Image: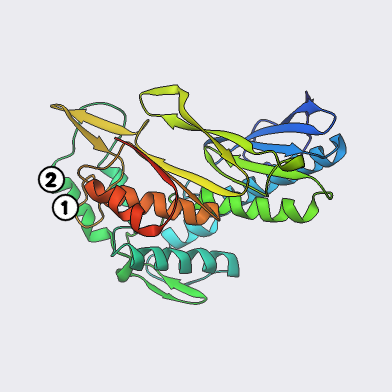
Amino acid sequence: MSTITVSAKDNPAGHPLPQLHGDQFSWQGRFEAMASPCDILLDGVNRKDAEQALAFAAREAWRLERKFSRYVSGNPVDQINHSNGEPVAVDDEMALMLDYAAQCHDLSHGRFDITSGVLRRAWRFDGSDHLPEQEETDALLNLVGWNKLAWHHPQLALPEGMEIDFGGIGKEYAVDRVLLDLKQSLPEGGSVLVNFGGDLACSGPRPHGKAWIVGVEDHQKLSGSSETLSLRGGALATSGDSRRYLLKNGIRYSHILDPHTGWPIPDAPHSVTVAAPTCTLAGMLATFAMLQGAEAEHFLEQQNVQFWVQR
């Protein structure tokens, strides 16, 4: 095992330093970002290249976390959320995310909405039986609605009191962003898989055509996997309520909230895992399926993708 040194500038949040395990040409790098364990698996590369890849992946994941997390004071999201209705100019990367959020809003008929994060003020998905009062959620709905903000590249005007939250798409974008850059820097014959908290993508098969073996979590056995999958290309993403839910009178309330009602989507699956060419697309389809509730399987069948649904 070796510890990868990164500068304090690249790691202002003070995350634990990345750790690299392995030998010869097969490596596993691990670090923490976006409140998730992050793994970089490398095959067909030497130690020096593996160390450089891990250091880059950690720096880039931390950069994206600093930029897009709603928890980082003074970052672009924080500036937008405290703009008091005044227009804020954004850079091209932020504009890309806002365009994607607008697309997701339209494709989901308004069920995917990055302004709905304010509903967390009423909901605490801690496994208890505490439900908010209807009046509390109704009041927050006044602060929800993508159509209430004005987005005209490069300026975003957010009505006072509203917030944006990229939590639903940021991790998948980070996987794709890191993988794209690592693919360009890997030596010929090398292969990499990027896994951020269970959302993952690979550059292709391992050397000699071998598949990457990945597991889909069983919501009933959080320490194990219900199924192992062979991945030779593309991405997987999962959306679910294995760890974030409420339970009252035998009814399980998922953390997937409907921005139209302020309440959890009824009859949503425990989890949805989707395979797609990119992690961003897989994540979008998995979340859209959760938002379909009882119609999740039917929705995914129409998308012509591989998927795994647990109920």
Q: Residue at x 26, y 43 (%)?
A: 268
The quarter of the picture where residue 164 lies is bottom left
Describe residue 98's horizontal placement relative to residue 196 as left or right: left
Residue at disc 1, secondary structure: helix
Q: Residue lying furthest front in this view? A: 209
Q: Which residue is mark 1?
A: 138
Q: Are marks 2 and 1 in contact (CB under 8 Å)?
A: yes
Location of the C terminus (image quadrant)? top left
Can you see residue 255?
A: yes
Q: Residue at x 87, y 38 (%)?
A: 48
Can you see residue 73?
A: no
Q: Nearer the viewer, residue 129 or 142?
A: 129
Q: Nearer the viewer, residue 217 or 129?
A: 217
Q: Give the CA separation, mark 2 to mark 1.
A: 6 Å
Identify whether 117 is placed above or below 308.
Answer: below
* Tally of marks: 2
> Callout 1, which amino acid?
Asp
Q: Position of residue 6 (x, y in %)?
A: 76, 39
Q: Tag on residue 153?
A: none
The quarter of the picture where residue 239 lies is top left
Q: Position of residue 287 (x, y in %)?
A: 38, 50
> Callout 2, which amino acid?
Gln
Q: Position of residue 133 (x, y in %)?
A: 14, 41
Q: Residue at x 25, y 26 (%)?
A: 128
Q: Residue at x 79, y 45 (%)?
A: 190
Q: Tag on residue 134?
A: 2
Describe residue 16's horizontal placement relative to residue 282 as left or right: right
Location of the N terminus (image quadrant)? top right
Q: Position of residue 144 (x, y in %)?
A: 28, 59
Residue at disc 2, secondary structure: helix
